[in-house]
Amino acid sequence: MKKCSSFHVGAALVAAQDDTIDQHDFKSKFWIPSGLLMNQEKSQEFHRKSLRLEGYDYSQPGAYFVTIVTHSRKCLFGRVENGEMILNDAGEMIVQVCHEVEMTSDWINIGSIQVMPNHLHLIINLGLQAVIDDLPAERRKPSKSEGLDESIDDPSLFVVIGRIKSITTGRYIQGVRKKQWPEFSGRMWQRSYYDHVIRDERDYEVVSEYIESNPLNWDNDEENYPF
């Protein structure tokens, strides 16, 4: 699982969000205490429920915890054994596409990524200057990849997630046709996704820990049960 420095992200988050939303109002209405993730039942509620903020501009600089789930929670990307996620070819493809989308703009940084059998966890940093300043020179020049006809200029979270879902679906269909990957019915991903605006460095660390430990909690994961 890839992890990004929470020190740099935390500093950038303070600068990025200071003028965008009243901090007291945010904390009282939307902030989930860090201790919540220590409770398994509540932690499931934390990442299943969409916490999309009404009136919040998801194109502004910020860090976002995102979960994307397959349609009907079908397991397509591998299996969990002894608390470790074993990716199949499709799961490896999901990781590759996420990094290809990341490479289209220095505005996009994937802070953490965890592919599970039927869902994907990401921390997506958008436009955080401290993160951008740490990028190697080649990352500051948009690149092209299969399925990415052009680079994205300062994309919103919705655009980034849309690219990931669209490209991974297209490549999975190719895998079904050419490599006999398991078929899915109708669509590969659920129409929506779950997101949480990461408020500060502590929030970032808690979410990162949750993502990293996800394979260990697979047996009790709500997504482990089909509809």
Image (cartoon, rainbow, N blue to C red):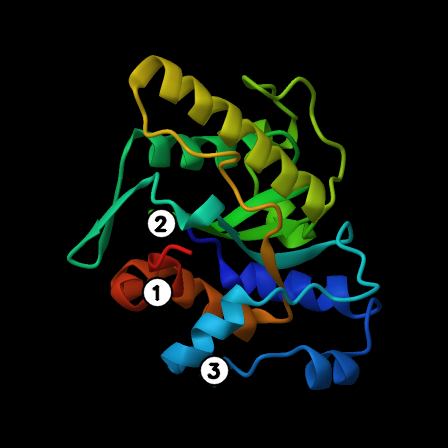
Indicate the amino acid at tag 2: Met
Q: Is residue 32 left or right of residue 157?
A: left
Residue found at x 52% / y 65%? 48
Residue pointed to by mark 2: 116
What element does badge 1 sit on?
loop
Image location (x, y in percent) of residue 195: 61, 59
Residue pointed to by mark 1: 221
Residue extending furthest top? 178
Residue found at x 59% / y 52%? 193
Image location (x, y in percent) of residue 141: 65, 26
Distance of label 3 from label 2 (alpha carbons):
22 Å
Q: Earlier in the sequence, mark 3 or mark 2?
A: 3
User: Residue 106, labelled with which disc?
Assistant: none
Contact (CB < 8 A) between labels 2 and 1? Answer: yes
Residue found at x 30% / y 29%? 89
Distance of label 2 from label 1 (alpha carbons):
10 Å
User: Considering depth in this image, is 11 or 174 the residue closer to the camera?
Assistant: 174
What element does badge 2 sit on?
loop
Q: Which of marks 3 and 1 is nearer the N terminus?
A: 3
Contact (CB < 8 A) between labels 3 and 1? Answer: no
> Residue 31 is drawn in which quadrant?
bottom right
What element does badge 3 sit on?
helix
Q: In this view, does 150 lie above or below 107?
A: above
Image location (x, y in percent) of residue 177: 38, 15
Q: In this view, does 187 lie above or below 172?
A: below
> Residue 183 is drawn in which quadrant?
top left
User: Residue 36, labelled with which disc?
Assistant: 3
Query: Dividing the image into 4 quarters, which one contains the C terminus?
Result: bottom left
Comparing marks 2 and 1, which lies closer to the viewer? 1
Indicate the amino acid at tag 3: Leu
Q: Earlier in the sequence, mark 2 or mark 1?
A: 2
